[in-house]
Image (cartoon, helix red, strand yellow):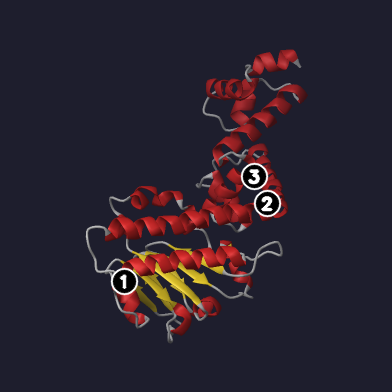
Amino acid sequence: MKTDTLNLNTVHQCNCILGEKTLHPLVSTINLSSKNWGQLDCLKVGFYAALLNESFCKSFIYGREKCDFSDGTILFFSPGETIEIKERAEIFHSKGWLLTFHPEFITGTSLGMNISNYTFFNYQKSEALHLSFREQKNICRCMEDIEKELLWSIDIYSKALISKYIEILLDYCTRFYTRQFTTRSEINKKIINKIEKIIENVLLNRQINSFGVSMTKYCASQLSLSDTYLEDLLKHETGMRMNEYIQIKCINIAKKSLLETNKSYNQIAKDLGFPSSQHFSRLFKRITGITPTEYKSQN
């Protein structure tokens, strides 16, 4: 059965769908308690959105784990993204808030310059943020602060104040996601172990150039995660980005080969997909402090 997708390019169009008065053409906060999405299937949005559900979501599609809180769930959407209303009816037809803001609104603001730092806008919906009671109340207060400012007539201070309130809300979400990574520590360690095995398998089987995609995207696809979430998880658990992590794993494999095989470091460099032995040697020395030849002679 064909699914109908409604294009919402503006905040005002979204307000109209939900019967909400437009207080600002580029920003809106909507209390969803008495709103009805009707028979909508899908929406394709041209703006950023944060959807807070204040009630417990039973559905597994938001990725709640046993170690997560259950006093609210928040989903993030970026411009150009399709929102599946019917499939996510549980969260869309519940008590909560919807914040929408158009990219044009944040142009020239601190929020506009830093929007890429809020990587959760690129997470899958199964990587949603699950809130404690205190966290949920905090987000609600932020929504109310934005709403209060929207109720003022638009003046020369509106953009600065509203964008700052949105930035504060997103900063809190960053803090709460960090807390969620912390409470998921044991789950994350298992994911890291899987990443190690995937990387080792790729390197040892000389599959470096066979995917046509980055190693991050490949690992993420194998683990059914978004590459952005995987990068953030790895950074939280190890302090490293994927490229750095792969380089260290690569050098560890090289160390083992230098000590346990008769291969020259030129051959090892080739096996591990380095463009040249010089490139391999430079990376080896940067990570270990010595050259491959020195490492072999000292061990």
- Say which residue label 3 marks: 237
Neighbours of disc 2 within 10 Å: few (<14), some (14-19), many (20+): some
Amino acid type for the residue under numbered disc 3: Glu
Does dot 3 land on a helix, a strand or a loop? helix
Kindly report the distance in space between the C-alpha atoms of the residues bearing marks 2 and 3: 7 Å
Of the image marks 2 and 3, the number of the one nearer the N terminus? 2
Mark number for residue 118? none
Question: Which of label 2 and label 1 is nearer to you?
Answer: 1
Q: Position of residue 52 (x, y in %)?
A: 50, 70
Eyeballing the image, is 296 above or below 246?
Answer: above
Does dot 1 land on a helix, a strand or a loop? loop
- Say which residue label 1 marks: 151
Q: Position of residue 248 (x, y in %)?
A: 63, 32
Locate residue 173 relative to residue 8 in the image: left or right.
right
- Say which residue label 2 marks: 188
Asked whether 34 or 41 is in front, the reply is: 34
Neighbours of disc 1 within 10 Å: few (<14), some (14-19), many (20+): few
Neighbours of disc 3 within 10 Å: few (<14), some (14-19), many (20+): some
Q: Are marks 2 and 3 in contact (CB under 8 Å)?
A: yes
